[in-house]
Image (spheres, rainbow, N blue to C red):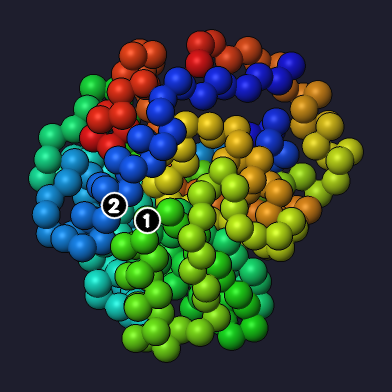
Amino acid sequence: MTHTIAAPAVDLDGLRRAIQDEYALVARQPEHGFHFLVGRPLARLLGYEEAWLEAIAEPTIASFAGTGNPFSVGSLQPGERVVDVGCGGGIDTLIAAGMIGPEGRAIGIDMTPAMLEKARTSAATTGITNVEFRDGFGEALPVEDGWADVVISNGVLNLMPDKDAALREMARVLKAGGRLQIGDILVQKPVPTDAKEDISLWTG
Amino acid sequence: MVAAGFVDFEIASRTDVYAGAQQSSSAAEFGTLGITFRARKASSDEEWQHALAALSCDIQGS
């Protein structure tokens, strides 16, 4: 027997605007202070290796706001194709680019213009050329069917109300047998319906 | 996960990524943790159908 989990009745456009506002602040003022950890201290907490960060521009590291470590559950191989869903300032996309090497290709996708700008600037300033950053939503990834060997994401799935749609999109862009390596959150206590429909709680 | 086409789902790690943040949050109220998980897209429709058939638990609530 299979079940789908109904998406909460939340104003999707309003939620996306609130998330964009929050993460634009993370992009532009990472020192602002948030309800979640950010930056290099968070990367250390999550087990990011210093060697991975050596090639990454400091502004991108400062705006890191993940909740897990997608690289801790499997290494990426030279030549592989990677999609990073909700790439933010690009830290995981750029780390992936280093792992897959010049024969590989990484695509980072995000809906927040300030984050995309930061990611593109970081790639340009560090000379990382096997990456591309695209504007888009997790529920409608701008990537062709079966393109990716690996889909990574970090702290993003929880921000999408329709998780079934997001997961189906991740499956669509993966090759058969492709890997999903995700950092996200686990909520251990039931969340009341009214809380699920409160946009302020999605970002705080 | 299985309904979307994935198999071999596994949560590999759990970390409190909210402790020590500069702003307070509702995360602790709901026992929220950062996790890392992995899964694999089924290699074939046969493998996926086998995984779907193997599901035997009901999910409470939504």
Tell me which chain the residue with mark 1 is part of: A
Of the pair A64 and A111, the residue shown nearer to us: A111
Residue A25, x across and y down, in percent: 21, 55
> Up-down: is A192 above or below A147?
above
Cβ atoms at labels 1 and 2 below 8 Å apart:
yes
Q: Residue furthest front?
A: A13
Which residue is the extreme one toward the bottom? A127
> Quick one: label 2, few (<14), some, or many (20+) residues within 10 Å?
many
Q: Quadrant of residue A191?
A: top left
Q: With B44 as the anchor, is A17 left or right in this view?
A: left
| Residue found at x 32% / y 70% | A118
Q: Is residue A41 left or right of residue A91?
A: left
The residue under the point 53% across, 47% down is: A138
Q: Which residue is mark 2?
A: A23
Q: Is residue A52 above or below residue A92?
A: below
Q: Residue at x 81, y 24 (%)?
A: B53
Residue A77, x across and y down, in percent:
62, 72
Residue that label 1 marks = A112
The answer to whether tags 1 and 2 share a subunit is: yes
Q: List x then y, in percent, for residue A183.
A: 44, 48
Identified at 46% across, 84% down, the residue is A128
- At mark 2, the secondary structure is helix
Rendered view: A46 above or below B8: below
